[in-house]
Amino acid sequence: MLFAMPTKQNEMLATIEAEYRETAYLTRRSEPHPRVLQALADVPRRDFVPPNVKHLAYANSPLPIGSGQTISQPYIVALMTDLLNPQPEQRILEIGTGCGYQTAILAKLAGKVFSIEILDTLAERAALNLANYHNVELRCDDGYIGWPQAAPFDGIIVTAAASHVPEPLRQQLKIGGRLVIPVGLPNLHQELLLIERLDATEFKTESILGVVFVPLIRKHKSREENNTYDCDTDATGRGKEPNP
Ligand code: SAH
């Protein structure tokens, strides 16, 4: 896609397209869907990052958003959105609202977006950032258990790394629904998985790319129990980089 103005945002989009081409041998996807690219063009990333990193808003890299967390790298946001393939009539669940940037992209593409953030300070900031997105519902809670009252969902996206695929999330998918989730070792290496629900019991799993995400935090479990982090723990934010 050609972008008329050489703005920083357009440069970011061109960089995302270049990274798609470079990683196509792993992801089997050589370009972002035009709808996804348009959503990235419509949502100013600058509006979602904290003041101290505004000057880096359009860099193709993760950025700190406070509380040890990060806003994802734009290429990863594009790729995960593409894998989820949200459609205008669909209901989407996001785990890990963070600053709300990925939520806003989803809100442009889907009918309704439900998003859960476990940390109060980030949930509150996301609510402010997303005030003008009227098809978004936010909740501050442990997203591991999903959002049973709003289920089932056409798509579920998890933007923090889990040690395993949370069973409640699989069960809250519609038949034909898609779950996009990084699974692996917290803070070290995860595989970005695309899981499709084929019927009541069958799921198809595709491994897309090696990635590094901040860990999925659990509210009421110890670190040993779930191989992730307690809510009170100061989870150390790590950048989200493709790690092929
Ligand atoms: N999509 C966000 C990514 C933020 S990083 C963005 O682009 O800004 C991952 C987020 O997941 C962090 O905000 C972290 O606090 C949140 N998180 C971690 N474990 C969670 C859990 N169990 N439930 C909900 N959110 C969680």
Image: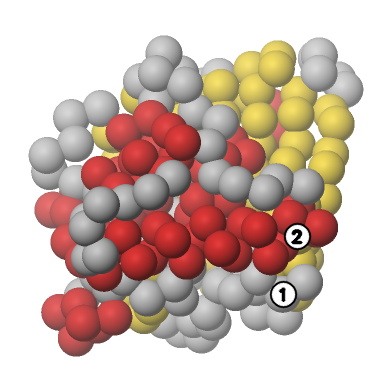
Q: Where is residue 241 in the image (x, y as percent from the top left)?
A: 60, 74
Q: In which quarter of the image is residue 183?
A: bottom right
| Image: 107 above or below 216 | above
Q: Quarter of the image holding residue 83? A: top right
On the rendered image, what quadrant is the N terminus found in?
top left
Q: Are marks 1 and 2 in contact (CB under 8 Å)?
A: yes
Q: Left of 56 or right of it: where is 207?
A: right
Q: In this view, does 239 lie above or below 22?
A: below
Nearest to the observer: residue 91 or residue 16:
16
In-front residue for pair 144/183: 183
- The kind of secondary structure element at disc 1 is loop
Query: Colour scheme used in the picture?
Result: secondary structure
- Residue at image x 67%, y 49%? 30
| Above or below 85: residue 2 | below
Query: Can you say which quadrant of the picture contains the C terminus?
Result: bottom right
From the image, tell me which residue sits under label 2: 209
Three-letter code for the amino acid on which mark 2 is drawn? Leu
Instruction: Say if 103 sits above or below 13 in the image.
Output: above
Indicate the quadrant where residue 177 lies.
top right
User: Which residue is at a point 25% across and 52% down the rendered structure image?
Assistant: 4
| Label 1 Cα neighbours within 10 Å, binned few <14 / some 14-19 / many ≥20 | few
- x and y percent of residue 27 in the render? 75, 52
